[in-house]
Each structure stands twice: as C-alpha cells, then as structure tokens.
Image: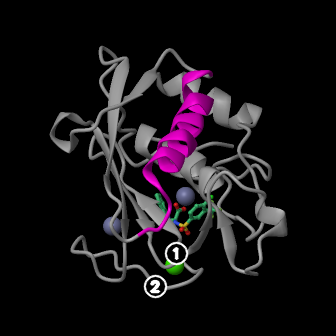
Amino acid sequence: LYSYFPGQPSWPRSKKSLKYAITATSETTIDRATLSAVFARAFARWSEATTLNFTETARGSDADITIGFHGGDHGDGEAFDGPLGTLAHAFSPTDGRFHLDAAEAWVAGGDVSTASSDAAVDLESVAVHEIGHLLGLGHSAVEGAIMYPTITSRTRKVDLASDDVVGIQSLY
Ligand code: TQI
Ligand code: CA
Ligand code: ZN
Ligand code: ZN
C-alpha cells in the first residue's frame, strides 16, 4: 500500500498548476532539450492521474519545484555518494527541491537495457518516483508500484501502478 509523509503534507488543494524549473545543469552532459523532454514526460504520468498540471518555467524564481544535478556534498546535509547508492532525492511538499546525483551514468531518452555501463540508470524512471515524493507520496509496500523502494540499474519503470494512482488521488 501507498504511504504519505508524516503529517500528510501536500500542495494546497487550490493550487492545481505547479511550475517547475530545471535550474542546475552544469554538472551533467545531458543537453537541455533532452532534459526538458524527459521531465515533461515524467510529470505527465502524474498529471494524467490527477487534476494537477505541470508547466516548465525557465526562471527558478517563478518555480514551485526546482530540479538540478549536484555532486557530493551540495549544501543540504544529504551528500551524494558517487555512482549508484543514492541516485536522487526529493523533499516533501511544499519544499519543491529535487536533486539528482551528477555522478550517475544517467540514460535520458535512450534504451537503458542496452546501455554500455552496468551502472546505467534511467533518468525518467527515477524522475517519476521522485515526483511522487515531491507531491507527497512516501514509499509503497506494493511491488510494481512506482513508489516501491527498489530500482534496478538498466531497468525502465515509468508506468504508475493502480496503487500509485489511488494514493495520489486520495491526496488531491
Ligand atoms: N533516493 C531515495 C528515494 O527517493 C531517497 C529517500 C530515501 C527518500 N528514503 C526516502 C526520499 C523517504 C523520500 C522519502 O527513495 S534513491 C528509488 C527506489 C532512489 C530510490 O536514490 O535511493 C528510486 C531514487 F524507489 F527505487 F528505491 C529513485 Cl525509483
Ligand atoms: Ca549515487
Ligand atoms: Zn540535495
Ligand atoms: Zn523514494
């Protein structure tokens, strides 16, 4: 079953449009157009399941959600650890920060199962999971749910399970 963060924080019910900005990209070699496309697809999975909608803005100061790539200790007390281990983290509502470990062998838009690195990680799969956290979902006990706390490298998993849908629909 799905879960929420303690106290069940969510974005205000009156706020149906959330803006996101991809702000910190100097530590990744993935180009901006590819990043925009991958995150747009990841947000679309959640907007299809809810009455929420998401739009990208170029300006971080306008954004509810900020997305960036960071290496090692990046100032929030949750240092990244190099390849594998922690891949990314996102804070609960209404913080909006979503950080990705710049040290991962991210695959964006390609076929992760044929990637040359054993440690290749599908960016869109991780994004769908972290957006669940940004919206207020904790981890799920249902294997196959996007919010189930296991991901395998070189695997793509982007479709919400009914458990994820019920969880998010009860929150919004
Ligand atoms: N990052 C952890 C995660 O997103 C960070 C984390 C641990 C966390 N406990 C949390 C975030 C509780 C919010 C609430 O789960 S991770 C997975 C999964 C990670 C893990 O890099 O380990 C995915 C990133 F679910 F497979 F374990 C993406 Cl999909
Ligand atoms: Ca890592
Ligand atoms: Zn961080
Ligand atoms: Zn998680």
Give the residue at x 39% y 27%.
Answer: 55
Is residue 132 something one can see in this rendering?
A: no
The coloring applied to the image is one colour
Q: Which residues are magenta?
A: 28-48
Give the residue at x 46% y 85%.
Answer: 81
At label 2, counting other C-alpha atoms closer than 10 Å, the crowd grade (few under 14, some 14-19, many 20 or more) is: some
Question: What residue did someone put label 2 on?
Answer: 81
- Does residue 8 appear left or right of residue 74 in this picture? right
Taking 157 as reference, is 52 above or below it? above
Q: Position of residue 105 (x, y in %)?
A: 60, 74
Residue 30 on the magenta span: yes
Residue type beneath disc 2? Asp
CA gap, disc 2 to disc 1? 6 Å
Q: Earlier in the sequence, mark 2 or mark 1?
A: 2
Question: What residue did someone put label 1 on?
Answer: 86
Q: Position of residue 32 (x, y in %)?
A: 43, 50
User: Does mark 1 have its CB less than 8 Å from ligand 1?
Assistant: yes
Residue type beneath disc 1? Thr
Give the camera-side residue of 93 and 85: 85
At label 1, counting other C-alpha atoms closer than 10 Å, the crowd grade (few under 14, some 14-19, many 20 or more) is: some
Question: Element at badge 2?
Answer: loop
Give the residue at x 36% y 83%.
Answer: 72
- Decide: marks 2, 1 in contact (CB < 8 A)? yes
Residue 43 on the magenta span: yes
Taking 146 as reference, is 26 above or below it? below
User: Does mark 2 have its CB less than 8 Å from ligand 2?
Assistant: yes
Question: Element at badge 1?
Answer: loop
- Does residue 161 appear left or right of residue 83 in this picture? right
Give the camera-side residue of 166 and 117: 117
